[in-house]
Image (cartoon, rainbow, N blue to C red):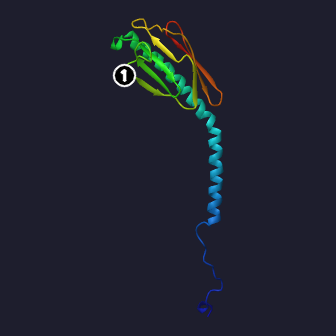
Amino acid sequence: MSSLLPPTSYHLPTQKGFTLIEVLISFAVLLVAISGAIVLLQPFQTHGELEAGVDTLATAFYRAQMLSRAVAGESNWGVRVNPNQIVVFKGSSYAGRDASVDEVSELSPLVTPTGLVEVVFNQLTGEPQQTGTTTLTSRRGEVRSVFINAKGTAFY
């Protein structure tokens, strides 16, 4: 007779999924973690932008020197460092250049250039008409310098 009796224990239906409060707390924790990561990674980004600027500047000096040595376009070639760009130009000065052949490389807004802003290399010899140092400074105060000697070699 016991087999005809209904079972004595009942199970309430279980609820599946997350409540709105659980989802909001998860998003809040995620936002805090992302914010912390951004703050911690900013110095690395700034340093990377500074290093990229130094590499770009040194490469531009080398490129202008090689074009002058090769007498490309039968002209001197030079480099001009502007606040947000580095320009390899054809001509004896930036003001009198042939702008149609400019090679422009972007310089990060996180980096500020100072010092020597224009270098022109002589045909055949590749020697610079100007020597000196261009200094790149990051917003965090990191400083890197690129020095051009009398032979046109860039040291950084």
Q: Residue at x 44, y 14 (%)?
A: 93
Query: Height in image: 6 above or below 48?
Result: below
Query: Height in image: 15 above or below 51?
Result: below
Along the line of sight, the residue nearer the viewer: 66 or 139: 139
Along the line of sight, the residue nearer the viewer: 118 or 103: 118
| Residue lying furthest left | 73
Along the line of sight, the residue nearer the viewer: 55 or 2: 55
The answer to which image quadrant residue 23 occupies is: bottom right
All told, the count of numbered labels is: 1
Instruction: Give the residue at mark 1.
Output: 101
Query: Height in image: 59 above or below 108?
Result: above
Q: Residues within 10 Å of mark 1 (few under 14, many from 20)?
A: few
- Percent across and percent down for residue 29 are 65, 54
- Percent across and percent down for residue 36 are 66, 44
Q: Quadrant of the C terminus?
A: top right
Q: Residue at x 36, y 22 (%)?
A: 101
Q: Quadrant of the N terminus?
A: bottom right
Q: Residue at x 46, y 27 (%)?
A: 105
Task: Give the side of residue 116 with respect to residue 102, left or right.
Answer: right
Secondary element at image label 1: helix
- Percent across and percent down for residue 99 are 38, 22
Q: Residue at x 64, y 26 (%)?
A: 142
Residue type at mark 1 is Val
- Percent across and percent down for residue 134 are 56, 18
Query: Height in image: 92 above or below 8?
Result: above
